[in-house]
Amino acid sequence: MPEFLIFRLYGPLAAWGDIAVGERRGSYSRPSKSAVLGLVAAALGIDRNDDDAHRALDGGYGFAVRVDAPGVPIRDFHTAQVPSQRRGKTWPTRHAELAEEQLNTIVSARDYYADALYTVALWPREAAAYSLEALKAALDWPHYHLYLGRRSCPPALPLGAEIVSAPGLVAAFEAAGFPASDLIRRLYPRQPAAALLAWDPDAPGDRPVETRRIMLRDGIASRTRRQFASRSEAIGAVPNRVDGGTRRGGA
């Protein structure tokens, strides 16, 4: 029977990246696979410049996310000082930029989701470099600090990672229980009856009815150069269970 690693992401603020254009830094409405695997890599102690290790994570695990509570989109504005652009001139570090004598002030916009809640599932493929037990141990006791997309977005609850055996993806989400479920019920007393579920199309076993398929630019090509490849994602809906699954009765 397939095994899945299930964990929960909750925080006052979260930002899940998007294609960055100009001075705006957008956010997907739910965790992207590259963002979640970046969090897993931080827990494992994988450095950002270790491209081979990041690509191994990307190819070694399937990914699904359930949007238990979508949160409220907000936008924040930042000011920063930068040197004027000059032909053939680049600055290797932020320190080098600020060392320039003449600096200009720019305004940038960053998008976030406030008070959102997500449940994530990972499952191993043949090329998996780590067991699910190793991933769970890392998420329980992470090597680096974990963030929900940006450094200003730490998790507000333990991830509660657990390994479940289930005949398929839907059953895996239903089987998971979380120790903070009582708190979650108080935070989200009323939610829609259905929750969006997005998953890698190769998910094993039972799946929701697929309503559409989209292409995202969040496959990991190079963390060092911040380059991402296209990835196909299936979309469907499942009953909303912000209090966790059925196995522990929401305890």
Image (cartoon, rainbow, N blue to C red):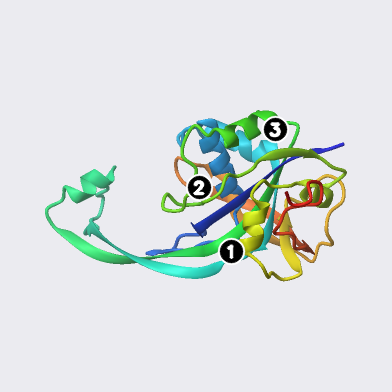
The residue nearer to you, when weighing 227 against 115, is 115
The answer for how far apart the CA atoms under marks 2 and 1 are is 20 Å
Decide: is 109 above or below 136.
below
Which SS class for mark 3? helix
Q: Is residue 100 left or right of residue 247?
A: left
Type of amino acid under label 3: Leu
Residue on which the image places disc 2:
227
Type of amino acid under label 1: Ser
Residue 42 image offset from top left, x and y in percent: 51, 37
Q: Is residue 195 left or right of residue 97?
A: right
What residue lies at 37% left-to-right and 64% top-to-bottom?
Answer: 23
What residue lies at 59% left-to-right and 37% top-to-bottom?
Answer: 139
Residue 100 image offset from top left, x and y in percent: 15, 51
The residue nearer to you, when weighing 30 against 192, is 192
Residue 175 image offset from top left, x and y in percent: 80, 47
Q: Is residue 120 visible?
A: yes
- Upstream in sequence: badge 3 or badge 1: 1
Residue 216 image offset from top left, x and y in percent: 62, 57
Decide: is 108 above or below 83.
below
Kindly report which numbered mark, 2 or 3, lies closer to the viewer in this rendering: 3
Residue on which the image places disc 3:
132
The reply to whether discs 3 and 1 touch (Cβ–Cβ < 8 Å) is no
- Upstream in sequence: badge 2 or badge 1: 1
What residue lies at 66% left-to-right and 38% top-to-bottom?
Answer: 59
- Upstream in sequence: badge 2 or badge 3: 3
Type of amino acid under label 2: Gln
| Residue 29, numbered label | 1
Which SS class for mark 2? strand
Q: Is residue 16 visible?
A: no
The answer for how far apart the CA atoms under marks 2 and 3 are is 27 Å
